[in-house]
């Protein structure tokens, strides 16, 4: 834990020296906002030259322990700003400025409340976005992406939207780097594998969180299904601890391994609500079942009508009721799922650049050419 006195000194230095010409770090910085961002970005980093990459963390009370798994140097963004340093290029999954920076907004730009882009402009000469998830697209997509110079997307659907809306940006299809290890022997086993009954099919439940989460409405229903299926619940990393405690009281197999990429191999069906989980199922050709949380319109009013998950919901099975018998009946209808597989095959090429196991290679090649030469 770093003394608050030292933190305050650095913050004062950030305020005082913001007009100073920065020293450029001629490397690529990878911004890790939370731990699961490593799973998205390490498959790219492994294909970049050794010594060309460093991490940035928004944490100011010491470097998080999860960085210990690599030997890559880590900087606090506070230290970088206080020392007037910035990277030649920073790769991030989304632009979220930490709370300590947001609290300084009146010192930086009078009257403006959104400082995320200002924060990232101070960290890098050029900002690159690696798509975090297919799913929701912000209603104000153009403003959301305004501070990125390059955007790495999963496939044709996103590229078309971004090219029409963001004509001045560099848009590249790269596929999904975080799934690369699924095509090698380096994928770790999930932590609940020993709990699966090999005689039963497995339902993988991948809800989002907050008002779009299906857990509150369907927890009892999914608990009832455990008599006939293995039901693995992999909650969102930001799910509330109170809801997790409720899940622990049920027969559902709760697994909180950080990244969902490792789970699809074991699923016979993937149950989703909103967010990007359904696209992982589509990528691995797994049957998709959408659940419908209560009053999703509370959150949906911030979605663009081009959001991919809205299109996907029109194509695949959506369950609105909580009756286990009806769910079991549809899961047993072989003809239905044969037709469903044909739809999945058609849609996969619409959403994903086809380079299984090599998405990180492609993204790294673009970064080398544009930002390391």
Image: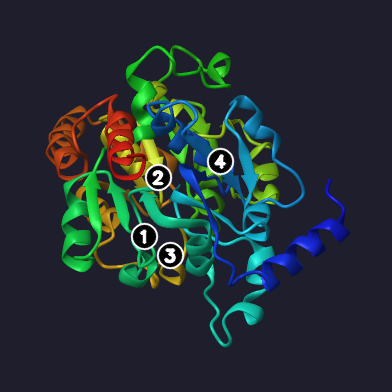
The reply to whether dot 2 and dot 3 touch (C-beta < 8 Å) is no
Residue placed most toward the observer, 295 or 56: 56
Q: Along the horizontal axis of the image, is 107 left or right of 9?
A: left
Q: CA distance from mark 3 to mark 1?
A: 30 Å
Say above or below: 132 vs 12.
Answer: above
Q: Quadrant of residue 162?
A: bottom left
Mark 4 residue element: strand
- Residue named by callout 4: 55
Coloring basis for residues: rainbow
Between the residue at mark 2 and the residue at mark 3, the CA separation in whole angstroms equals 13 Å
Q: Which residue is mark 2?
A: 272
Contact check, label 3 and label 1, Cβ < 8 Å = no
Of residue 162 and residue 120, the one placed in the foreground of this image is 120
Residue lying at the far bottom of the rendered structure: 111
Tag 3 residue: 296
Quarter occupied by the C terminus = top left
Residue 128 visible in the displayed image: yes
314 on left or right of 245: left
Closer mark to the observer between disc 2 and disc 4: 4
Percent from the top left, x then y, of residue 344?
Answer: 19, 37
Asked if the residues shown at circle 4 and circle 3 are in contact, with their CB atoms under 8 angstroms apart, the answer is no
- The answer to whether residue 329 of the structure is visible from this angle is no
Q: Which mark is residue 290?
A: none
Instruction: State the image coordinates of residue 82 (x, y, percent, origin top left).
Output: 68, 60
- Disc 1 element: loop
CA gap between label 2 and label 4 equals 32 Å
Q: At x 29% / y 32%, what residue is drawn?
A: 359
Using the image, tell me which numbered label, if any, was put on residue 148: 1
């Amino acid at each position: 834990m770093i003394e608050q006195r030292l933190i305050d000194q650095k913050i004062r230095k950030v305020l005082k020296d913001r007009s100073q010409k920065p020293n450029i770090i001629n490397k690529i910085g990878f911004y890790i906002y939370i731990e699961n961002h490593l799973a998205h970005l390490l498959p790219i980093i492994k294909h970049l030259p050794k010594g060309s990459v460093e991490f940035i963390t928004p944490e100011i009370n010491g470097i998080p322990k999860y960085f210990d798994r690599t030997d890559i140097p880590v900087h606090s963004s506070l230290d970088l700003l206080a020392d007037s340093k910035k990277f030649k290029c920073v790769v991030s999954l989304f632009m979220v400025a930490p709370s300590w920076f947001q609290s300084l907004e009146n010192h930086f730009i009078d009257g403006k409340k959104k400082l995320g882009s200002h924060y990232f402009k101070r960290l890098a000469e050029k900002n690159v976005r690696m798509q975090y998830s297919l799913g929701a697209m912000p209603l104000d997509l153009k403003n959301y992406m305004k501070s990125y110079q390059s955007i790495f997307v999963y496939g044709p659907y996103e590229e078309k939207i971004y090219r029409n809306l963001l004509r001045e940006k560099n848009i590249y299809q790269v596929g999904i780097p975080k799934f690369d290890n699924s095509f090698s022997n380096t994928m770790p086993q999930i932590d609940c594998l020993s709990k699966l009954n090999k005689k039963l099919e497995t339902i993988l439940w991948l809800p989002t969180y907050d008002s779009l989460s299906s857990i509150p409405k369907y927890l009892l229903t999914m608990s009832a299904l455990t008599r006939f299926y293995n039901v693995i619940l992999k909650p969102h990393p930001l799910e509330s601890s109170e809801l997790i405690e409720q899940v622990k009281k049920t027969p559902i197999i709760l697994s909180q391994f950080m990244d969902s990429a490792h789970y699809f191999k074991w699923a016979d069906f993937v149950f989703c609500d909103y967010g990007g989980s359904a696209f992982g199922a589509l990528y691995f050709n797994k049957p998709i079942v959408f659940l419908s949380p209560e009053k999703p319109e509370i959150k949906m009013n911030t979605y663009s009508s081009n959001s991919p998950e809205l299109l996907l919901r029109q194509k695949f099975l959506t369950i609105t009721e909580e009756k286990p018998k009806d769910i079991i009946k549809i899961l047993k209808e072989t003809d239905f799922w044969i037709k469903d597989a044909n739809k999945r095959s058609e849609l996969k090429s619409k959403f994903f650049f086809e380079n299984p196991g090599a998405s990180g290679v492609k993204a790294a090649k673009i970064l080398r050419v544009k930002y390391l030469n």
